[in-house]
Amino acid sequence: MKYALIGCGRIAGNHIQAALDNGLELTAVCDAIPGCAESLLRKFGLERDRNIHRYIDYKQMFREHPEIDLCAVASDSGSHARIALDCIQAGVHLIIEKPIAMSIKDAEEIIMQSRKKGITVAVCHQNRFNSAIQAVRRARDEGRFGTLSHGAVHVRWYRDASYYRQAQWRGKWSSDGGCLMNQCIHGIDLLIWLMGSRVTKVYGAIRRRQHPYIEAEDIGMAVLEFADGTVAEIEGSTNVYPGDLEETLLVCGDKGTVKIGGPSATRIECWKFADRKTEDETVSKLDEQTENIYGNGHSRLYRDVITAVREGRRPCADAEAGRNALEIVLAIYESQRTGMPVSLPLSDFSSAEMEGIFDSGHQVGRRIKPGQD
Ligand SMILES: NC(=O)c1ccc[n+]([C@@H]2O[C@H](COP(=O)([O-])OP(=O)(O)OC[C@H]3O[C@@H](n4cnc5c(N)ncnc54)[C@H](O)[C@@H]3O)[C@@H](O)[C@H]2O)c1
């Protein structure tokens, strides 16, 4: 399968590694900044490989290499939708970095166009492939939790000014969002995937407390209501001084409780079920080692996408999964903006509509009267 990568920044190495791990044929790499593609290839000792074509314009890349089968989009979040739609028009299967887009309208356009063209689209929610997460999902599918009560995700991380100053797009409403859209969206995806029911209502609150140089939130909290009566809470932050503390997930039922921890949801911290299985002994000790906070999931996600394309089935983290995780973040934003719970599905909302929300003089919430804040 012939493969191309658009966007050769910080996360790009995980994509090249995943492509190599899965035997994809590296056909082209593209970055709008001249030299970026080259330095990425250098990290893998591939700088002398002239069969890998370098581009600064991905449209030219598709014109000159119509044989590309699969493309990954790892550019800044605000450009995902536009580039993804161009890839779909070019007839190329797609892996889009999270978030799938910055608005519901764009995410749904990606879903519609890809269906129309028979294109496979996956979104990089790679932590779904963590062994710990797969084990919880299996237990849930087998009904081992009994009647579910509630769930939680806590992403308690730290990012300082130098992190946000790495690139212009970071922390801006239209191109990134804040800690919920960038960092916590992985945990949100896992939470709703593991709870397994449709989210019907979202109560959210966000603040920007410690990073005045960004536009968006650095702390967000929310309560979710699901169609089956369960509830869940979300806490996501980049304010936990002086460094990443934890990412934890909790799923509670009347016959089972699981808590997952580790730097990127890779360690089982509690594994208790009323029924006993021989595998429980091993599973309860799962503690997958990772080189960095991005985990080991990219290669596994690629394997799933390649198989999905070959078998004509949907990938595990498909475009709908990307849309659903995005919808929760946008609903939390909308809830902050209105001061009200938000009912799902969201018809449309874009993160750019949050512009100015933390500026002085902006009234946070419809129900707050001047002087009551
Ligand atoms: N899945 C994960 O765990 C994970 C981890 C980190 C980042 N990400 C996501 O990956 C994306 C990239 O993040 P990053 O940290 O690598 O950012 P980055 O700024 O380091 O890299 C982005 C690159 O994309 C290039 N680019 C932008 N527009 C382009 C275009 N039109 N054509 C070609 N190249 C273009 C930029 O020049 C830049 O080199 C973001 O959406 C981010 O949220 C995901």
Image (cartoon, rainbow, N blue to C red):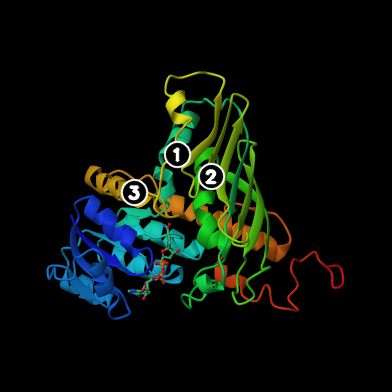
Is 321 left, or right, of 300 in this rendering?
right
Residue sticking out furthest to the front = 242
Residue 98 location in percent, x, y?
A: 44, 59
Q: Residues within 10 Å of mark 1 (few under 14, many from 20)?
A: some
Residue on which the image places disc 2: 192
Determine the secondary structure under disc 3. helix
Q: Count residues near mark 3 (Cα–Cα under 10 Å), then give few for <14, some for 14-19, many for 20+.
A: many
Q: Is residue 111 left or right of residue 325?
A: left
Q: Amino acid at mark 2?
A: Ile
As measured in the structure, the alpha-carbon distance from the residue carrying label 2 to the one carrying label 1 is: 22 Å
Place of residue 95 in the rendered image (x, y in percent of width and height, measured from the top left): 33, 57
Please name the residue shown 71% across and 64% down the image.
338
Residue situated furthest bottom in the rendering: 34
Residue at mark 3: C-beta within 8 A of ligand 1:
no
- Front position among marks 3 and 1: 1
| CB of mark 1 near ligand 1 (< 8 Å) | no
Kindly identify which numbered label has been placed on residue 287: 1
Label whose residue precedes the other's in the sequence (2 or 3):
2
Q: Are marks 3 and 1 in contact (CB under 8 Å)?
A: no
The numbered dot on residue 6 is none
Q: Secondary structure at mark 2?
A: helix
In space, the residues marked 2 and 3 are separated at their CA atoms by: 18 Å
Q: Earlier in the sequence, mark 3 or mark 1?
A: 1
Quadrant assignment for the C terminus = bottom right
Residue denoted by label 3: 301
Q: Quadrant of residue 307?
A: top left
